[in-house]
Structure formats: C-alpha cells, structure tokens
Amino acid sequence: MSDRTSEPFEVKPSPIHGLGVFAKRSFAADMFMGNYEGERTVVNGMYVLWVEYDHGEVVGIDGANELRYLNHARPANAVFRGHSLFSLVEIAAGTEITFDYGEDW
C-alpha cells in the first residue's frame, strides 16, 4: 500500500464545479506538478485531455489519475505542456489548481 500523504494533490468538492484538484503543498511558478495519466483514446469524453505535441501529433488521454478532476478557469494557475502540468504562478497549499480548457470549451 502506498503512502498517499506525500502526494501533492487532494481531490475534494470545488466551488467552481463538482470535484476539483487542490494543492496539498505549495508550488513555485513554472514548476512541474505532475502528468495527466491514462489510456490513449480517439473518442472524446468527460475526462479526455487532447494533447497536441510539437511534431503535430494529437493524442487523447482518458484521465485515470487525480488530474482528471482539474477545473477550468480564466485566468488559470496551471498549464499543460504536452501531458505534463506546470504551475503558471506561485500556488499556495490549499489552493484549487485550474487550467484553461481553451476556446472550444
């Protein structure tokens, strides 16, 4: 059994919508926070993150870890670079982590 106390995120009810991802520790600006994990898919769904890589490949990832509960906000405090999540600003422990879903959302 893994020790979940060292994990950087907590999923709990969000004032934005449903469940959200909250920082269990602080993050400096432009800090790697974690990877969006799951199976590749070509079918859109509630937890699918569409990633366009530098070489033009577009991949759907059907979220399987806690990052699937990230909510949308403008301005956001985090951004995906590929399937990796980075903080845009300093994020204090207890803060909800958000990203911009994009114009089509």
Image (tube, helix red, strand yellow):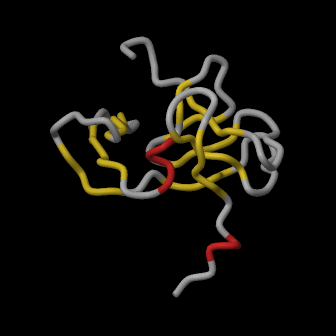
Q: Quadrant of residue 64?
A: bottom left
Image mark count:
0
Q: Position of residue 69 (x, y in %)?
A: 48, 43
| Left or right of 27 in this view: 61 | left
| Left or right of 90 in this view: 23 | left
* Nearer to me, 72 or 42: 72
Q: Position of residue 39 (x, y in %)?
A: 26, 56
Most distant residue in the bottom direction: 1
| Left or right of 1 in this view: 95 | right
Name the residue: 16% across, 38% down: 43
Quarter of the image that includes the C terminus: top left
* Nearer to me, 82 or 4: 4
Q: Position of residue 1 (x, y in %)?
A: 52, 87
Name the residue: 63% across, 43% down: 86
Q: Position of residue 38 (x, y in %)?
A: 33, 56
Name the residue: 73% across, 41% down: 30
Whether 4 is drawn above or below 77: the answer is below
Most distant residue in the left direction: 43
